[in-house]
Image (spheres, coloured by chain):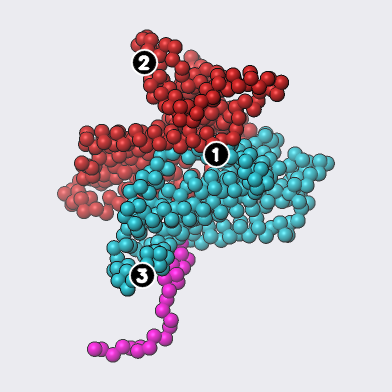
Chain colours: A cyan, B red
Amino acid sequence: MTELSQPQPTKPPRSQWFDVWDQFKHHKGAMIGATLFFLIVAAVYLGPYLWDIDPTKTAIRERNQGPSLAHPFGTDQLGRDLLARMMAGGATSVSVGITAMLLSLFLGSFVGVLAGFFRKLDGPLMRLTDLFLALPLLPLLLVMMLLFREPLNAAFGLERGIFILIVSAIGITSWMPTARIVRGDVLALKEREFVLAARSIGTTNTRLITRHILPNVLSPIMVSATLGIATAIITESALSFLGLGFPPDFPTWGRLLFDGVDYLQQFPERVIWPGMAISLTVLSVNYLGDGLRDALDPRIRGR
Amino acid sequence: MLTFTIRRLVLAIPTLLFISLVIFLLLELAPGDPMAQVPLTVPPEVKEKMREALGLGQPMHIRFWKWIVQFFWIEPQVLIDYYFGTSFSEGKLRVISWQTRSPVMDIVVQRIPQTLWVVGTAYVVAIIIALPIGIYSAYRQYSWFDQLGTFVSMVGFSVPPFFSGVLVIVIFSVQLGWFPSIYDTTHVVNSWDSFVYQLKQMIMPVMVLALQITAQLSRFMRASMLDNLNQDYVRTARAKGLSEYVVVMVHVLRNSMIPVVTVIALGIPSIFGGAIITEQVFKVNGIGQLLIGALQANDLPMVQTLTFIFAVLIVLFNLIADVLYGILDPRIRYD
């Protein structure tokens, strides 16, 4: 036995997340994306405290103004301040994106873990996933939006009803990719020695899944989380753009874009602001996801 | 291969039946009443008769069965009658739209050419652009061209069609005045000038759709080329003195096309779905717009048939992709 140069480790062991962060820092696009995304999120949630004009307040004398100090983004056809509307709309769009992503992640991981872990459930659950993948999603979303709008509005109030409807519709139609990825990973993990060891000391299935399986499939789940936010924001905006999303006096980025199309000839900037906001958010989230995927992949890490 | 194809075809039937059931049940749960627009002065017994005329009086499973029969049995007969002048379908009830009181399939057949022209052209254009970009960015990995390609495809992923569409309208139609912002589907091409006009009005929708498809395809092409470029057979090909062009364009390209071809096949139905938004932006009256119109008018038979047609397309192209995969790559034959 050779003598160890340092019998006692002086530094605490590095956790996996340190390595991930180290790798993530080197991905320039991902860092820019992450910064931009957090800036946008901060702007839409904290911005209204600094810029306290009511987004629904109409001032008909000040309608159709260009950018000025009082209204940096100008005003719309009813004299509502566009900056305030952009922030209010962004808060809704980002909230829808994040909530719908959480729902679809939950469904996807649930189905994926069950299918991967319990062999009996694998066949039926994967057939179900295939069936969902074969459904025409955008038409179905439109159908769902149209059909369940009124009962939910009656049950939860106008804004909350439509929020619940959009979030659950997007969640229900977007969990399949996550389920497939998680299932694949769980299938591989299940055969590893540490699972066998845990099982041999009598760990129950529930504990096995929550303590040993789930932490190990966290990285694919995180990557699909970022991509999920992006698709959810785009889907919500698409629904609002088709006039089937939030009601007219309730701004979201998609709705603002839709309203701006009518004034395209005179005031093209009204379309450009919300469009840029959607695109920038989605672009930053996509870069964030790209960097996260590289950082969480141990084969790439350290390069 | 043949048995595999047949097995997949047989499996597709229950899938499609299940999907049609899901769509039917979803519409059935809908609280929307097709009689909502009828004035209140119409007496209830007349209303009841109108309901029955729409086929609403019967229980759910009978209506589902009727729809299945109409869609899978009577509509093909109509098609045969149309082509061969026979009269199988005479006097049989077809799927009737509540909006126009005419058979749904007739309207769909009228609308499909517009969608096919725009979407089909966009798909072909995108493939022609995406493949060279993917090949070259893989061959010169991490060059400025590759970086640019990555950025452009990220933008293509991130900019939704309802924004890119509106943006090109602002630029090319409002500011520059080059192209018309509305797609005129009644336009007939019969001279050089009208052909130029048709070309002009197609440029913007095709551009918007093609950007999205190019973004996805060029990424796939690049990844697939990268997988193959470092393989041993490439070294062998170089070692026996083949020219660089032959190595890349024949040996590597052929092998990397296998996954890309299946991705192209898989993407076709989703393009029909995604084209709903583009059609709405440019006012192309294709099947996407037909669906939106039917949804807003609460025209359930139309919505059901259209959604089901989309589902058929998805299942069909999944099948084609699977079979293509087996044909192109002898290592992964399933049987």
Q: Nearer the viewer, mark 3 or mark 1?
A: 3
Q: Amino acid at mark 2?
A: Ile
Tell me which residue sits at (54%, 25%) in the image.
B56
Name the disc covering residue A203, or none: 3
Name the disc covering residue B80, or none: 2
State whether residue B57 appears in this view: yes
Tell me which residue sits at (31%, 60%) in the image.
A188
Image side of residue A280 versus residue A178, left or right: right
SS at circle 2? helix
SS at circle 1? helix
Quadrant containing the N terminus of chain B is: top left
Q: Amino acid at mark 3?
A: Thr
Instruction: Tell me the residue that label 1 is attached to.
Output: A144
Q: Amino acid at mark 1?
A: Met
Q: Residues within 10 Å of mark 2 (few under 14, many from 20)?
A: some
Tell me which chain the residue with mark 1 is part of: A
